[in-house]
Image (cartoon, rainbow, N blue to C red):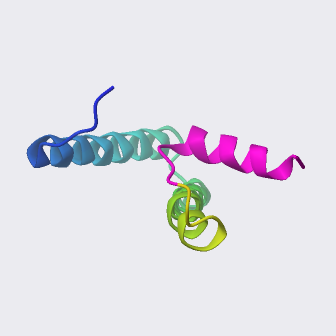
């Protein structure tokens, strides 16, 4: 698969992710409309955002600055290879 180069397509992709996330959160809250569900959903979203930041910023800047990751599978494979002594 090619890398996206067109800024309009990149922005459209980002907006589609946003709309998908809002729709999924709204449907979950409509299915179980409680303060607890809303708080747990918020915590889950926050935690996944922090993990994403960790995976692509912290690892590249502080753990292994020479390796560039292409996705979460790439991060997992790299961390798995690092833990196995050679």
Give coordinates of residue 66: x percent, y percent: 55, 61
Give coordinates of residue 29: x percent, y percent: 47, 46
Q: Residue furthest bottom?
A: 62
Q: Residue furthest right?
A: 85
Whether the magenta-drawn stretch holds residue 30 is answered as no
Q: Quadrant of residue 19?
A: top left
Total residue callouts: 0
Give coordinates of residue 2: x percent, y percent: 28, 30
Q: Could you tell me which residue is drawn at 58 percent across and 41 percent down?
A: 74
Image side of residue 5 versus residue 73, left or right: left
Is 79 above or below relative to 28? below
Q: Nearer the viewer, residue 72 or 31?
A: 72
Is 60 above or below relative to 29? below
Q: Quadrant of the N terminus?
A: top left
Whether the magenta-drawn stretch holds residue 71 is answered as yes
Give coordinates of residue 3: x percent, y percent: 28, 37
Q: Could you tell me which residue is drawn at 76 percent across and 44 percent down?
A: 81
Image side of residue 14 versus residue 46, left or right: left
Q: Could you tell me which residue is drawn at 12 percent across and 43 percent down?
A: 6
Q: Nearer the viewer, residue 40 or 51?
A: 51
Image side of residue 41 versus residue 10, left or right: right
Image side of residue 3 versus residue 51, left or right: left
Q: Quadrant of residue 76?
A: top right
Q: Quadrant of residue 13?
A: top left
Q: Residue furthest front?
A: 86
> Predominant secondary structure in magenta?
helix
The boundaries of the magenta stretch are 68-86
């Amino acid at each position: 698969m090619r890398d996206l180069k067109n800024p309009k397509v990149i922005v459209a992709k980002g907006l589609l992710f946003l709309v998908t996330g809002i729709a999924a959160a709204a449907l979950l809250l409509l299915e179980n409309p409680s303060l607890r569900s809303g708080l747990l959903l918020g915590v889950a979203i926050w935690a996944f955002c922090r993990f994403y930041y960790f995976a692509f910023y912290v690892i590249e800047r502080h753990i292994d600055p020479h390796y560039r990751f292409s996705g979460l599978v790439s991060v997992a494979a790299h961390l798995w290879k690092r833990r196995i002594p050679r």
